[in-house]
């Protein structure tokens, strides 16, 4: 059995706290162990105020002594969720010098000192991973780094700040004021410790610098990104945009134009049919384009403690699996899972049935659904299809597929009722 991997966690706020809880919960501990064949054990948690109780975190692990926590020979990995560039930059350099791999969520640090840190890690023979620094749980760094490694990417564009997107979506959808929406984004853990970075575009600019660096294999830093944020957008801009059939989004863009890098962040109007227009709340979405792979988009939760922690744990697993075989290669990595019968899946169904156009037919169809205990949400009847037939199109309330099937079988089995085979399609919401 492999030795457990000892970990030091720097920072135990929104993100670090979620990492500590994930590494402490039996279910997620087991998932991590299954994924990488090793136990991951939290040995130190470094914070500013060690006297404050922290939900789900063993108080014996908590201190403000970063130096000791980084030098401990019992740890091989440092997770950085402290934020800021100072003293964090020094902590990462110390970790590398002590031979520790590092996983970080810190986009400002990477966008300002990424080149130095990556070189220091390489010189020390350790690795630096930073999936959580870009788009929360969306694995865009991994996609650019691995899947698009040789694809000659020419464009990375998208919504990369969850807080701004949450504010714009809330203002447009529920008429929340800017201040109300920002307060809610902060309460939900989406915003930075200093939310001015979210709303003035600096957070998105840092992420665009990171994504451009990975996509173009070129050093693109924070200073290379021209940015503005949503802090000058007013509610009436959103209303006018809507009148023009558009929505306002904060867009980041990194593009190669004739061998030169264009990197920018700006609020922009998108036509309602644009693929990014419907990305709401704190979600992020990124479109990657290359001549060989075409256009690929990735989207998902872009902010939040648990979501970001999940990206951090993903990096930890990938570091461990880079040295060992992955769960698919190791026999014991496979779980023995029972199959869930598709007929037991519960959902709404669209049903299309042609029936004889006679009195009482609608009642008989309704009764078939009633006896299968399926409730009907909407029904449309069109009479006179092909002379003697009527068409019934209905949508059910959620029911198991086998119940809907039973109703359709009953209808199909009545030769004086059904004309042709009825069909049912799942309705996804
Ligand atoms: P946070 O809630 O403010 O937590 C920061 C933690 O670091 C706190 O536990 C704090 O200690 C500790 N800390 C800060 N400065 C320190 C210092 N000088 N010495 C010792 N401890 C220090 O911040 P967060 O939202 O978790 O963000 C952390 C990092 O993750 C940032 O780089 C952020 O950009 C990034 N990130 C956040 C999100 C998100 O959705 N929130 C998503 C992706 C990435 P105390 O608890 O004692 O104050
Ligand atoms: N504050 C950031 C955001 C967290 O709102 O997108 C995710 O990086």
Image (cartoon, rainbow, N blue to C red):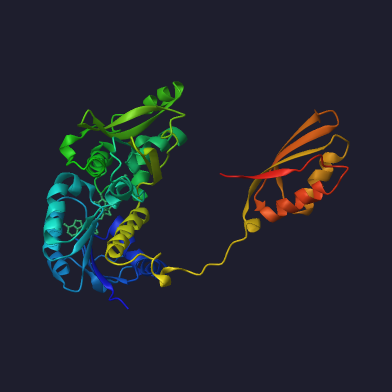
The residue lying toward the viewer, choosing from 136 and 147, is: 147
Indicate the quadrant containing the C terminus: top left, top right, bottom left or bottom right: top right
Q: Position of residue 218 (x, y in %)?
A: 18, 41
- Residue at horizontal 47 percent and vertical 69 percent from the top: 335
User: Residue 80, relative to residue 280: is it above or below?
Assistant: below
Indicate the quadrant containing the N terminus: top left, top right, bottom left or bottom right: bottom left
Q: In the drawing, does residue 402 fall left or right of residue 41?
A: right
User: Residue 70, relative to residue 376: is it above or below?
Assistant: below
Q: In the drawing, does residue 299 fall left or right of residue 385?
A: left
Q: How many marks?
A: 0
Q: Quadrant of residue 64?
A: bottom left
Q: In which quarter of the image is residue 26?
A: bottom left
- Residue at horizontal 42 percent and vertical 71 percent from the top: 331
Q: In the drawing, does residue 415 fall left or right of residue 283?
A: right
Residue 55 is at least partly visible in this image: no
- Residue at horizontal 80 percent and vertical 47 percent from the top: 412
Q: Quadrant of residue 428?
A: top right
Q: Where is residue 227 in the image (x, y as percent from the top left)?
A: 23, 33
Residue 183 is at least partly visible in this image: yes
Q: Where is residue 155 in the image (x, y as percent from the top left)?
A: 30, 35
The residue lying toward the viewer, choosing from 44 and 215, is: 215
The residue lying toward the viewer, choosing from 86 and 275, is: 275
Q: Position of residue 170 (x, y in %)?
A: 42, 38
- Residue at horizontal 41 percent and vertical 35 percent from the top: 276
């Amino acid at each position: 059995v492999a030795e457990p991997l000892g970990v030091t966690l720097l920072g135990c706020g929104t993100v670090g706290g979620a990492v500590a809880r994930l590494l402490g919960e039996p279910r997620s501990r087991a998932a991590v162990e299954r994924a990488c064949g090793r136990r991951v054990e939290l040995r130190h948690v470094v914070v500013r105020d060690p006297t404050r109780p922290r939900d789900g975190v063993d108080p014996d692990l908590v201190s403000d002594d970063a130096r000791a926590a980084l030098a401990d020979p019992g740890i091989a990995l440092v997770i950085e969720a402290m934020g800021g560039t100072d003293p964090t930059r020094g902590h990462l350099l110390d970790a590398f010098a002590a031979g520790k791999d590092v996983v970080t969520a810190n986009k400002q640090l990477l966008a300002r000192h990424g080149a130095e840190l990556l070189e220091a890690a390489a010189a020390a023979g350790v690795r630096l991973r930073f999936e959580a620094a870009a788009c929360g749980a969306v694995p865009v760094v991994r996609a650019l780094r691995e899947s698009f490694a040789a694809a000659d990417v020419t464009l990375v564009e998208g919504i990369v700040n969850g807080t701004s997107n949450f504010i714009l979506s809330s203002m447009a959808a529920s008429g929340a004021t800017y201040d109300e929406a920002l307060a809610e984004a902060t309460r939900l853990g989406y915003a930075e410790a200093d939310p001015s970075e979210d709303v003035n575009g600096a957070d998105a600019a840092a992420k665009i610098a990171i994504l451009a660096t990975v996509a173009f294999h070129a050093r693109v830093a924070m200073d290379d990104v021209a940015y503005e944020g949503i802090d000058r957008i007013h509610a009436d801009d959103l209303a006018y945009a809507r009148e023009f059939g558009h929505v306002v989004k904060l867009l980041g863009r990194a593009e190669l134009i004739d061998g030169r890098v264009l990197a920018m962040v700006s609020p922009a109007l998108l036509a309602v049919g644009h693929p990014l227009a419907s990305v709401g709340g704190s979600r992020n979405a990124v479109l990657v384009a290359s001549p060989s792979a075409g256009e690929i988009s990735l989207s998902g939760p872009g902010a939040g403690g648990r979501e970001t922690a999940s990206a951090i744990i993903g990096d930890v697993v990938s570091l461990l699996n880079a040295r060992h075989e992955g769960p698919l290669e190791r026999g014991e990595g496979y779980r023995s899972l029972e199959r869930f019968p598709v007929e037991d899946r519960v959902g709404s169904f669209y049903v299309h049935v042609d029936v004889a156009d006679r009195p009482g037919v609608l009642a008989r169809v309704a009764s078939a659904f009633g006896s299968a205990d399926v409730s009907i949400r909407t029904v449309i009847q069109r009479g006179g299809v092909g002379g003697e037939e009527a068409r019934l199109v209905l949508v059910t309330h959620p029911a198991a597929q086998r119940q809907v099937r039973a109703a359709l079988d009953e209808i199909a089995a009545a030769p004086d009722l059904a004309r042709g085979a009825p069909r049912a399609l799942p309705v996804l919401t």
